[in-house]
Image (cartoon, rainbow, N blue to C red):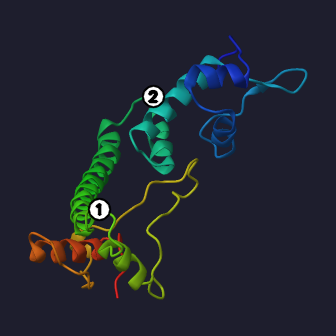
Amino acid sequence: MEETPRIAIGVLATHTGANIETIRYYERVGLLPAPARSSGGYRLYGTDHLKRLNFIRRARVLGFSLADVRKLLTLADQRRRPCAEVRAVAAAHLDDVKGKIADLKAMERVLADTIARCETGSGSHCPMIDALYTNGIQAGEQRRLHLHAGADQPARASLPRASHVHATAINVPTTGVTNPARGRQSIESCVSNGILPGR
């Protein structure tokens, strides 16, 4: 690491937009090298820390997991950077991003159709509420929310691909629905994607 200049952790946090606890966490898991210490025991960071932290932050903004960030940092630290390996990591992440986009688009359609099932005005009967109340989470079924192993922050919900699940029918009134078949199909898709519980 470079000897000069040296900055305190608060200054590093200001320059990079990372909070202090996140910086300390990156040190604990080995993404950031341990900094030098002042005579009073305070952390003192060099320009290499600043560059590396910016690298990590940028990779996280792009959605790379900490495991992928670690791989990219290892590759970046090599004198002769193997572009093929970097490309493989990025390509795998791109496939994951595309899958999440497809899941979110499906969720958008399902939610729009489900919301349309609710009667307008202040009626006392709401099919969407009925659907959420009627079917509890089945034994062994877990929420599809998870934390990346060693992640510095909670990950976004990870939904299964539609091709990997089977729809389970759910009984929701179709009164007033313009296209009942489409609405029922959307609800089944909603169940299969874990948005609504199945029977």
Q: In the displayed structure, would residue 2 be above or below residue 160? A: above
- Residue 47 shown left or right of residue 78 in the figure: right
Q: Quadrant of the N terminus?
A: top right
Between the C-alphas of marks 1 and 2, the distance is: 66 Å
Q: Does 146 sit left or right of 32 as displayed?
A: left
Examine the rendering and report whether any part of residue 149 can be seen. Answer: yes
Q: Which residue is mark 1?
A: 121
Residue drawn at (23%, 60%) of the image: 112
Dot 2: element: loop
Instruction: Name the kind of residue labelled 2 in the image.
Output: Arg
Specify whether 175 is left or right of 29: left
Q: Quadrant of residue 129?
A: bottom left
Q: Amino acid at mark 1?
A: Gly
Q: Tell me the tag on residue 79.
A: 2
The answer to whether any part of residue 77 appears in the image is no
- Which type of secondary structure does the marked residue at label 1 adopt? loop
Vertical comparison of 139 with 28: above or below:
below
Compared with 54, 98 (above or below) is below
